[in-house]
Amino acid sequence: MSQTYQKLTIVGLATVMLAIPSIVHAQLSPISRQVALESEQEQLSAVDLYNRGVDKLDAGDYSGAISDFSDALELDPSDADSHYNRGYAYQTLGNQRAAVYDYTEAIKIKPDFEQAYTNRGTAYLALEKYQEAIADFDEVIKLSPKNEAALLSRGNAKQQLEDYQAALADYEEVISNNSQNAMAYYQRGLTYNQLEQHSNALTDYTEALKIQPTFAEAFYNRGITKFKLKNIEQAIEDLEKAAELYQQEGRTENYQSAMNAIQQIQE
């Protein structure tokens, strides 16, 4: 049993980020085309390219959108929205470094661009640049003190740096503002696991599941936590439920991980 105990681990924060409601979205505010004068023809061309890029973002054509925003920026390099939306397209395609560049350019032009700070912070998280991510989420929270996504993401970054008490403070602030935020309980549960406070973690995973009953990671981690607390039968029940949900969601690797955990416990 002790060997099995050593093998089973809590689902990490990379999975958490997949579960967070999207905080990265295109800024799609329209630019008027109707009042351009002949002397503004060049700017109108940039506007047309921008709007076509937005249409491509809506259609999921991210490479095409990047091309249009790049052409728009050739004509109007001071357009923060074109930088922002090109950054969003790069980020969606997984090019975090290019996204960081564009968000940085957008912020230079528009220093209070809250969503650009949010998305750049998310890109820094993906690049494991946690201090930079924290700095960006600090800016978001200055602009929007109750921004739950920024607080959760800042807590995530602090957790990665093993600054667990600071991470707990961010999660607790979210819960104090919104007691129905399942992700805040889930991430706080992860932190409690890392602090070896498994009873507290168990309580938080249970709260997360009351709010979001199909939260597969919460079932998985609650199962592992119950195993650590020597509650074997209930641990298996939770892992079986996690496996069922993973299978329904088509997440084959996660399903296999849950089944492997059950097998290890039963050995």
Image: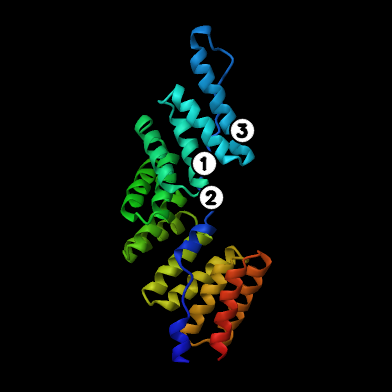
Q: Nearer the viewer, residue 96 or 28?
A: 96
Residue designated by label 2: 22
Residue 56 appears at what percent x and percent y? Answer: 60, 35
Kindly report the distance in space between the C-alpha atoms of the residues bearing marks 2 and 1: 14 Å
User: Which residue is depicted at the point 59% across and 63% down?
Assistant: 212
Task: Name the front one of labels 2 and 3.
Answer: 3
Residue type for callout 3 = Asp
Residue designated by label 3: 55
Judge left or right: residue 217 versus residue 123. right
In the rendered view of the protein, which quadrant contains the C terminus?
A: bottom right
Q: Which labelled disc corresponds to residue 89?
A: 1
Q: Of label 2 and label 1, which has the lower sequence position?
A: 2
Residue 198 appears at what percent x and percent y? Answer: 43, 78
Crowd tier of the residue under label 2, counting other residues whose Cα lies within 10 Å: few below 14, some 14–19, many 20 or above: few
Residue type for callout 2 = Ser
User: Which residue is depicted at the point 50% across and 79% down?
Assistant: 224
